[in-house]
Structure formats: C-alpha cells, structure tokens
C-alpha cells in the first residue's frame, strides 16, 4: 500500500526541528532513515499529519571517542556503525549486533536514533544500549535531557521521549579493555526479526565472571537487562549454578505470542542463548548443553 | 502543506526536476513519473527487495524512501547500470545460469549483487547469500543466482578456470 497524505517539512537545524515538534506535537513524526517509519506508514499503521525530516542535519551524524565515552550521533546509520573502526575497537558488541540488523539496503538508510526512538522490542540496538549502559540524549523545548537506557524503553514502540523531544545522540562508556562480549539471535532468516536475542558484555577473571550484563530482546514488550546475571557473578559456574540462573531468568521474562513463536518457545530459546553465552564467554563447552536439562 | 514540493536530482546521469507530493515514494517517482519501470514494486514495506536502487552510491529500498528525500541526490536504477554496461557480465551470467525465471526480482537481485561485488571482489557463497538475504526470489530457489554471482566474481578476478 501507499502512505496516506501528509505534510512535509525538511528541518534546517535542530532548533528548527524542535520548533516544528513543539508546534505539532503528537500530530508530527520525525523522519530520519525511515526504515521503520515508512513501512508503518505504507501499511497505514501510522498516519502522521506532518513529517519532520531531520535527514540533512549533519550535526547529528558521527562517532566520537573521547575521555572514555563513545558518543554516537542520532543520524549515524547502521552501516556507519558496522564499518566504524572506533566501534570495532571500543564496542565490538555493536559491530556484531548491527550485522544482524535487517539487510544491507536497509542498513544503508536506517539510523541508531531511529531504531532507539522506534523501540521495537525485537530490535538489536535497544538491548545493546542496556547492556552497554548507554545514556540517551534528548533535546526539547526546555533544553537537553539525559536518560539512562534502563529508563528509556517503556513498552512496544514506547519510550520516555515526549512528542516535543528529539533524540540527538547516545553516549556509551567505553567497556573495560579486558571485557568480552557475546551476541546471538535466533531468526528464521538472516536479517529477519529476531525470535529471541542476547547481547552480553562480561569481565572474566580466572574462569569466573567478575561482571556480566545480559541484554535480552524479543522476550517481552521491551528489552530486558537481566538481573539474573547476578547469579553467575563471582561464583564458580557449575551446571547447578546455571540451572538456578535459568530459573531466575524465567521469572524475569514476559514473552509475547506472535506469528513467529509462542511464549514457551521464547522462554526455552532464552535459556539456550544464556547457556551458549556462558559457555562461549568462559570457554567451557561442557556448559553449552545446559539448557536442555 | 500537503502540497507538492519541488525537487531536483540526477537519475542515471540525467538531471530531473519534479513537483511531487510528500507521500510519493522514490519507486513510484521512477516508475510512474519517469517511466523507469525496471525498478519493481513488490511488498512496499521493505521486505522483498524488488525495488532496490542506488542513491549516492548506496543500495536502498526505493519503496522506503520518499521522493522528497532524494532532493539533490544521485539515483541509479537498473536501466542506468544496464545501459552503461556496468553489469553486462553479471547479466550474462544470470542468463547463462538460468538465474531468473519470471524476472520480477531480477533488477533488485542485480543491484544487490553488483553492490556486493564492488565491496568484496571475491565473496564466498555464504557472503553472497547474506548480502542477498533481503531480496526475495519466488522462482529459482536462489542456488542459480548464487552460482551466477560467484561465477561473475571469479571472472572479474581473473580466476575462472
């Protein structure tokens, strides 16, 4: 189908975009890469009165690493993240994750800001933001607001952003230089919506986790930073410890039913991912089969 | 403000000026206004890949791009890369290997394949499949398409036996 009629404004600056959003509020939608917004409009799931196109605001584009913080502009495209030597060096979890986001033609347009503001619970980047402890920076009529990723995602396609606010950047603390990561998702076909996925960052010393952050996606109405990771930190991991972590994880999950999977299947796959993650990060092949127990 | 917006862009090397409604997508601009019907419209929500074109050198879904967004951009379609001879060898390989049947997906397949071959001259079959993962073919089962692209890559690298 085609999108219904709407008015179009090409923002000339962040200030100009904010003026338009302030004037039109919920009747307006921000267009950055358009790779989630335009399908929704073509399917008539969304019919905004005004599109505010921020695509030409070069000031919102780019990756800067400075003083232990990676700042990524909202208009930075998936392909920019995928090919960035700074991201590969400092946040390789993101490089791995972005390779799973849709397909090349979509990664050439889709942006990190768009993905986060869209807040699809099956998206990779929102979960990565939780795992990496990101801060989301929004600008609105009353100035700038810094929102912890853990406070940002509020439900299916819902975030802490007000209709008058624009997501302008994200900041990530550079992970510890010895930390390792794991990323995997189950999907019907490479690039399809994840059935369940896990983005993990860890510190391992002497065969134990000293830090472990598990960001699951497609396991509920928003990405989940699993508290059950705590069960695996500062202990020798045995199959019993892993089973306890599975049980704790199961209590945190609230999977949705859709055409791809039942909640029970998602619960099972989340455990499979956790087992593979722990096994891979600790280099313990013996733990890999744990989820079938 | 739902009135037409003036845009100017380059399409296959030709300067184009148009007045378009904001809701018009690039695929429809190409097909309906410029009569470049090689770009196909399948799903209209970014799943099938039949509408793949190049904008400023990058492949994109023309159904997920508004015509107003390509103001000042350089657009290349299957007609452009065919006429210039850029993909003549790829087209020959598709024909010889029966990598098309109905042909609906073929323009998008060729655009995606050429994009891959420009970025990595000698991709393996897994990389070819991954790069084409966003392009549906409902006839061939992909095997022949992957073969044709692999053959073209080897030929371009001078590595065909």
Image (cartoon, rainbow, N blue to C red):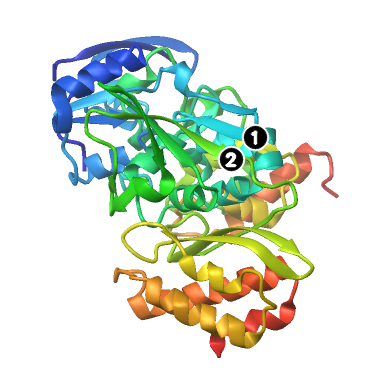
Q: Residue at x 70, y 53 (%)?
A: A179
Q: Chain of mark 1?
A: A
Q: How many marks?
A: 2
Callout 2: chain: A
Closer to the camera in the image, A165 or B96: A165
Q: What residue is shown with label 1?
A: A68
Which residue corresponds to mark 2? A173
- Please name whichever residue, B32 or B4, is drawn nearer the observer in this view of the structure: B4
Depth check: B72 or A146 in front? A146
- Distance Cα–Cα, label 2 vs label 1: 6 Å
Examine the rendered structure and indicate whether residue B40 appears above or below residue A153: above
Horizontal side, residue A175 vs residue A155: left or right: right
Up the image or down, A22 lies above or below A2; here it is above
> Is label 2 on the same chain as label 1?
yes
Which label's residue is closer to the chain start, 2 or 1? 1
For the C terminus of chain A, give its image quadrant.
bottom right
Check the image and name the residue furthest to the bottom. A293
Q: Is residue B50 above or below residue B59?
A: below
Query: Whole-percent x and y of residue B83?
Result: 54, 24
Asked if marks 2 and 1 touch (Cβ < 8 Å), the reply is yes
Q: Is residue A188 visible?
A: no
Give residue A257's mark. none
Instruction: Name the residue rendered at 56%, 36% in the picture.
Output: A79
Q: Tell me which corner region of the image, top left, top right, bottom left or bottom right, holds residue B28.
A: top left
Near mark 1 (Cα within 10 A), the count class, few <14, some 14-19 or many ≥20, is few
Disc 1 element: loop
């Amino acid at each position: 189908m085609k999108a219904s009629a709407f008015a179009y404004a090409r923002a000339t600056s962040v200030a100009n975009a904010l003026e338009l959003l302030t004037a039109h509020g919920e009747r307006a939608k921000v267009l950055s890469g358009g790779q989630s917004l335009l399908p929704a409009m073509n399917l008539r799931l969304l019919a905004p009165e005004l599109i505010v196109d921020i695509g030409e605001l070069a000031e919102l584009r780019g990756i800067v690493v400075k003083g232990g913080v990676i700042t990524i502009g909202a208009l930075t495209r998936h392909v920019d993240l995928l090919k960035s030597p700074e991201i590969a060096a400092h946040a390789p979890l993101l490089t791995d994750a972005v390779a799973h986001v849709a397909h090349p033609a979509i990664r050439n347009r889709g942006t990190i800001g768009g993905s986060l503001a869209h807040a699809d619970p099956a998206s990779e980047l929102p979960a990565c933001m939780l795992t990496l402890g990101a801060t989301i920076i929004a600008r609105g009529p009353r100035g700038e607001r810094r929102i912890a990723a853990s406070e940002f995602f509020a439900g299916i396609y819902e975030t802490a952003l007000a209709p008058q606010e624009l997501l302008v950047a994200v900041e990530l603390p550079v992970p510890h230089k010895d930390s390792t990561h794991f990323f995997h998702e189950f999907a019907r076909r490479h690039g399809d919506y994840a059935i369940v996925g896990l983005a993990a960052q860890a510190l391992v010393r002497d065969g134990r986790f000293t830090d472990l952050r598990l960001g699951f996606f497609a396991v509920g109405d928003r990405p989940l930073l699993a508290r059950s990771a705590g069960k695996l930190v500062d202990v020798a991991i045995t199959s019993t410890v892993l089973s306890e972590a599975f049980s704790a994880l199961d209590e945190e999950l609230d999977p949705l039913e859709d055409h791809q999977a039942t909640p029970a299947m998602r619960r099972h796959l989340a455990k499979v991912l956790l087992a593979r993650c722990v096994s891979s990060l600790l280099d313990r092949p013996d733990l890999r089969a744990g989820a079938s127990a | 403000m739902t009135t037409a917006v003036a845009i100017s862009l380059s399409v296959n090397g030709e300067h184009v000026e148009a007045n378009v409604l904001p809701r018009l997508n690039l695929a429809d601009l190409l097909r309906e206004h410029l009569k470049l019907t090689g770009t196909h419209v399948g799903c209209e929500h970014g799943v099938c890949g039949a509408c793949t074109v190049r904008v400023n050198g990058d492949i994109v879904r023309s159904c997920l791009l508004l015509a107003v967004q390509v103001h000042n951009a350089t657009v290349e379609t299957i007609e452009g890369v065919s006429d210039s001879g850029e993909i003549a060898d790829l087209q020959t390989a598709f024909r010889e290997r029966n990598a098309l049947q109905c042909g609906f997906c073929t323009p998008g397949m060729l655009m995606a394949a050429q994009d891959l071959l420009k970025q990595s001259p000698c991709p393996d079959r897994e990389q070819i499949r991954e790069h084409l993962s966003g392009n549906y073919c409902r006839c061939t089962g992909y095997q022949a398409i992957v073969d044709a692209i692999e053959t073209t890559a080897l030929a371009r690298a001078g590595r065909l036996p």
